Image: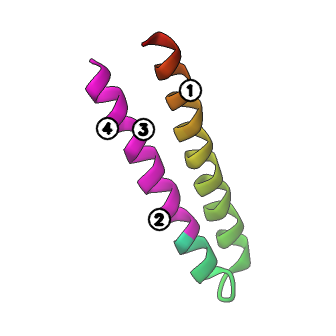
Amino acid sequence: MHTFSKYFELAYLIIGIVFLVEGVLKLSEIPEKAYMTLGFGVLAIFMFFFKRRFRKRRE
């Protein structure tokens, strides 16, 4: 069960990085959508650290 938690953490990190890169690339074209994409990226990276912290507490 702990291995699934590690994979979900990595998925949050990868998704966050993808959203951040996409948001930076869209920033010059469509700023409204870029801000939302950047927000999702920051949220996903926050979830990575949040889930990692609580997984380590359980171990």
Q: Which residue is mark 4?
A: 7
Vertical position of residue 15 compared to residue 8: above or below = below
Q: Label 3 vs label 1: CA separation?
A: 10 Å
The x, y position of residue 55, in whole percent, is: 47, 21
Vertical position of residue 47 compared to residue 44: above or below = above
* Kind of residue indicated by mark 4: Tyr
Q: Label 2 vs label 3: CA separation?
A: 14 Å
Tags 4 and 3 touching, CB below 8 Å: yes
Q: Which residue is mark 2?
A: 18
The x, y position of residue 50, in whole percent, is: 59, 31
The earlier-in-sequence mark between 2 and 3 is 3
The earlier-in-sequence mark between 4 and 2 is 4
Q: Which residue is mark 3?
A: 9
Quadrant into which the C terminus falls: top left
Quadrant into which the N terminus falls: top left
Toward which corner of the image does residue 31 lie, by quadrant? bottom right
Of the two numbered discs 1 and 2 in the rendering, the one whose residue sits closer to the viewer = 1
The earlier-in-sequence mark between 1 and 2 is 2
State which region is magenta. 1-20
Label 3's element? helix
Label 4's element? helix
At a point 57% along the width and 37% down the height, the residue shown is 49
The earlier-in-sequence mark between 1 and 4 is 4
Q: Nearer the viewer, residue 40 or 1?
A: 1
Q: Which residue is mark 1?
A: 53
